[in-house]
Image (tube, rainbow, N blue to C red):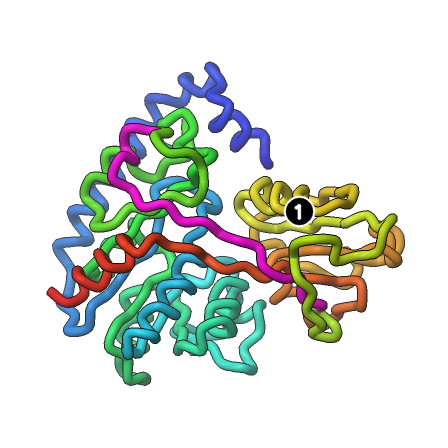
């Protein structure tokens, strides 16, 4: 976690020195919202935006994957659009398929395509990604991975995701705090989801639905072998080398602490592009298991070794949330 992120969530007093800049950022964000919404073009297919108001990981992508699977069980054909954070494609829009690399599309779009089988289109301009998706694929609902503040994108349903542990930090907008928009923005979204945490943790979350990301299995990157996550999946005496390049690695590390092994933590920047050299004997013990998230595993498959494992997860959503989503789509 960077120095600034720690300051945001520890509510460091010196951040108030940046408050005037935060006010300017907030005003510019409001102006940008009005100007982009004035250029909106209608869309015949419902668009669901899954985003957040804070920088960093909140669990948006796991939720989006769970929503895709739910909609598929309802007989719908969802498609996904994404900015493709960190992607370096030669041209956009980019359609993600079995041959698309993480370097071209970004880690999240590749993971979504693998986990859901849905068509995925990447473009920094999400409105353009939407047009391409609808032109190239027969879909009857579109989900946008992030993009709550991308107001050129038409949307039927807005779903905001909040980290139930970190919440909103000092509740200031960038750069004095972690917020892209003020907490009051949550009053205008259609559905509010809290990832973990405790009930009654913040007044703004009174009507939120709570989701839980549950670790269910360990999957070997080299062989595909699958072991139950619970119990003692590794040999006695092993040490887990936990590697994470995600927005909020703490939640991942805490899940591994439930296993009966010593834990070594290795933190990389969010969306970091792993290389084989990151896992050589000068940095890690090749005789001990290396465990990572599914998102990070998409960047390591080309050089996977027998000691590399990913944690397979499932998202548990309350029935009331899914019923509210279905009702909103049927309008």
As drawn, is 245 to the left or to the right of 326?
right
As drawn, is 276 to the left or to the right of 199?
right
Q: Report the quarter where the C terminus lies.
A: bottom left
Q: Main secondary structure of the magenta part?
A: strand
Q: Position of residue 321 (x, y in %)?
A: 28, 54
Q: Tag 1's secondary structure?
A: helix
Label 1 neighbour load within 10 Å: few <14, some 14-19, many 20+: many
Q: Residue at x 47, y 73 (%)?
A: 113
Q: Position of residue 256 (x, y in %)?
A: 66, 47
User: Does residue 311 appear in this view?
Assistant: yes
Q: Residue at x 27, y 34 (%)?
A: 206
Q: Is residue 105 above or below residue 271?
A: below
As drawn, is 312 to the left or to the right of 89?
right
- Residue 209 in the magenta stretch? The answer is yes
Q: Position of residue 31 (x, y in %)?
A: 20, 41
Q: Position of residue 235 (x, y in %)?
A: 84, 56
User: Does residue 300 appear in this view?
Assistant: no
Q: Is residue 164 above or below residue 125?
A: above
Q: Residue at x 36, y 22 (%)?
A: 19
Which segment is the magenta one?
202-220
User: Residue at label 1?
Assistant: 256
Q: Report the quarter where the N terminus lies.
A: top right
């Amino acid at each position: 976690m960077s120095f600034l992120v720690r300051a945001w969530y520890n509510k460091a007093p010196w951040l108030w020195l940046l408050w005037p800049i935060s006010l300017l950022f907030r005003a510019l964000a409001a102006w940008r919202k009005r100007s982009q919404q004035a250029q909106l073009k209608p869309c015949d297919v419902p668009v669901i935006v899954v985003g957040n108001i804070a920088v960093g990981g909140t669990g948006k992508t796991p939720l989006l994957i769970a929503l895709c699977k739910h909609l598929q069980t309802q007989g719908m054909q969802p498609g996904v659009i994404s900015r493709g954070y960190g992607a370096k494609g030669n041209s956009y829009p980019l359609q993600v398929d079995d041959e698309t690399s993480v370097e071209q599309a970004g880690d999240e779009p590749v993971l979504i395509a693998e986990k859901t089988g849905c068509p995925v289109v990447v473009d920094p301009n999400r409105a353009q990604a939407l047009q391409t998706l609808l032109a190239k694929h027969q879909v009857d609902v579109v989900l946008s991975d992030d993009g709550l503040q991308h107001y050129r994108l038409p949307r039927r349903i807005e779903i905001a995701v909040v980290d139930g542990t970190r919440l909103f930090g000092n509740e200031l907008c960038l750069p004095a705090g972690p917020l892209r928009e003020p907490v009051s923005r949550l009053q205008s979204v259609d559905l509010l989801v809290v990832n973990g945490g405790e009930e009654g943790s913040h007044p703004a979350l009174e009507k939120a639905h709570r989701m839980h990301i549950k670790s269910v299995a360990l999957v070997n990157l080299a062989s595909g072998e699958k072991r139950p996550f619970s119990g003692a999946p590794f040999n006695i005496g092993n040490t887990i080398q936990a590697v994470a390049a995600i927005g909020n690695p703490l939640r991942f590390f805490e899940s591994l602490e439930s296993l009966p092994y010593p834990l070594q933590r290795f933190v990389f920047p969010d969306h970091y592009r792993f290389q084989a050299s990151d896992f050589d004997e000068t940095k890690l013990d090749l005789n001990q298991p290396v465990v990572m998230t599914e998102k990070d595993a998409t960047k390591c498959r080309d050089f996977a070794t027998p000691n590399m494992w990913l944690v397979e997860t499932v998202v548990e959503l309350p029935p009331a949330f899914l019923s509210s989503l279905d009702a909103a789509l049927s309008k």
